[in-house]
Image (cartoon, rainbow, N blue to C red):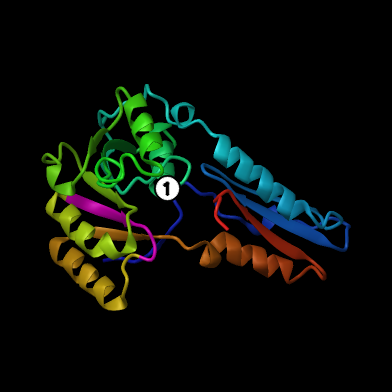
Amino acid sequence: MKLSIVALAMALATSSAFVPSSSSSRRVVIRHESSSLGVSSSSSNSKNTSKATSKKLEEEFESVDPATVASPSAQAETKEGQAEVVLVGCGAPNRGMGWYHAVQMLEGRCPSASLDYVIEPWFLGPGAEGPGGPEFNAWASSLSSGPSFLTSVADLPAPARPRVALISGRTADNPRLLKECIEAGCKCIYLEKPGAPTVKELEEMRDLAAEKGVEVLMGYNKNVCKYVRKTREFAETVPGSHVTFVSNNAYE
């Protein structure tokens, strides 16, 4: 299993993106939003810029209508040159990391990926009436020609094209889910960090994937990404500079 750092569809920052102006104090702001990454710089005069921007992003994040983000006209039929993607663990709209992956594929932001199946045992089962359940099922129902929704990896039919699994479930479930995805014919698996509860389990997952000839990619961690490292290196060259990261994850 290749536990590598993956930044899907992300433009990595280069040194030319951080050219200082004549101002002696600069603030570099990186906005990591649901479907894009922007890098900008601003004066450090406004001390509350970070908090205000974070609050604005949070408000936008909460107000998104899932039905308008993921178009009901999205096609689930895999085309030539596309991989058949199985999303395992979607989560609630505007909350789950898996849901954001789904939105990006449904909007065509990953041209080589066709989201054909969504595995969501909780919101399609015991959690259907609980927090997030009604919102999830309303979103799923709005995708009239979108992916098939299933409660178990075992319910998947045989692959029609090269199959990729994107596992975004609970960390404790990942070892089992990876094994099930391999058995379901997935030839490549994107595994959200941290991958498994223990190093021992990660090693066992690595060995199983290697034995079956399946490539596994680990979701990147922002604090060690290239664009973060280059930003910090640049900030060290500017006396009095500050680096602020703004995310639209609405969690304290």
Which residue does the image show at 77% across and 52% down from the upper left?
A: 49
Q: Is residue 38 magenta?
A: no
89 relative to 185 in the view: left or right: right
Amino acid on which disc 1 is placed = Gly
- For the record, the magenta segment spans 186-194
Closer to the camera, 125 or 48?
Answer: 125
Residue 48, horizontal then vertical, whole percent = 79, 54
Residue 79, horizontal then vertical, whole percent = 26, 30
Residue 10, horizontal then vertical, whole percent = 51, 49
Query: What secondary structure predominates along the stretch shown in magenta?
Result: strand
Residue 61 picture quarter: top right
- Name the residue carrying label 1: 96
Which residue does the image show at 31% across and 35% down from the upper left?
A: 114
Q: Residue furthest front?
A: 129
Measured along the vertical axis of the image, is residue 230 above or below residue 78? below
Q: Residue furthest bottom?
A: 200
